[in-house]
Image: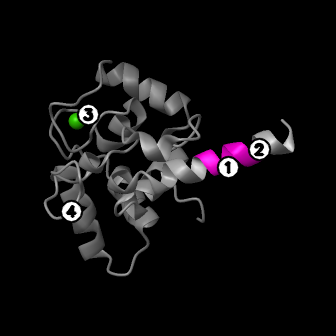
Amino acid sequence: MDRLSLWLGAALTGLVLLSAPAVLALPKYRLLTAQQVGHDKGDPLWQLSGRVVPCVTCHLSAQGGPGWNPFGESLRAGFRAEPGARFGEVLYRVLEARADADGDAYPDALEFHARTNPGDAASRPEQGLDVLQAEFEAAGGLEQYAPRTR
Ligand SMILES: [Ca+2]
């Protein structure tokens, strides 16, 4: 790629970023989660799609803000149990507990693997639990969701 193409690409990316304030509102935990569970891979514009770890992964509203679903409440409980802990550690401990926040029979970590919503029982993986669990283990299991700075 020549310099002009690179510059144009960078300028276009900047414009897109500036024009997407709704998607990027309060993005910190959303961005951290996407990176920690690897949903940022393979799509350079993943931050803008709104489909990669959408706000409703933890919040009741598609715009985020107060009001959390059962998975969001699990994270909040994790922060209460460990005040001052880094987000990545809290997320990992919640996933490590193999809990099923929304009660749809799929543990939260498997829902991240299947890219379904761990806080919404209406969003559940298509595969059977055993098949999905085997797929998850083959992909690296829980360790792939460990905080990067461990
Ligand atoms: Ca679910």
Earlier sequence position, callout 1 versus callout 4: 1
Mark 1 or mark 4, whichever is nearer to me: 1
Q: Which residue is mark 3?
A: 106
The quarter holding residue 86 reads bottom left
Q: CA distance from mark 3 to mark 2?
A: 43 Å
Give the Cα separation between the discs numbered 1 and 4: 31 Å
- Give the mark nearer the N terminus: 4 vs 2: 2
Residue at numbered disc 4: 65
Q: Earlier in the sequence, mark 3 or mark 2?
A: 2
For marks 4 and 3, give the one nearer the viewer: 4
Residue assigned mark 1 = 10
Q: Magenta segment range?
A: 6-12
Q: Which residue is mark 2?
A: 6
| Res 59 quadrant in image | bottom left
Q: Amino acid at mark 3?
A: Tyr
In the figure, is residue 48 to the left or right of 123?
right
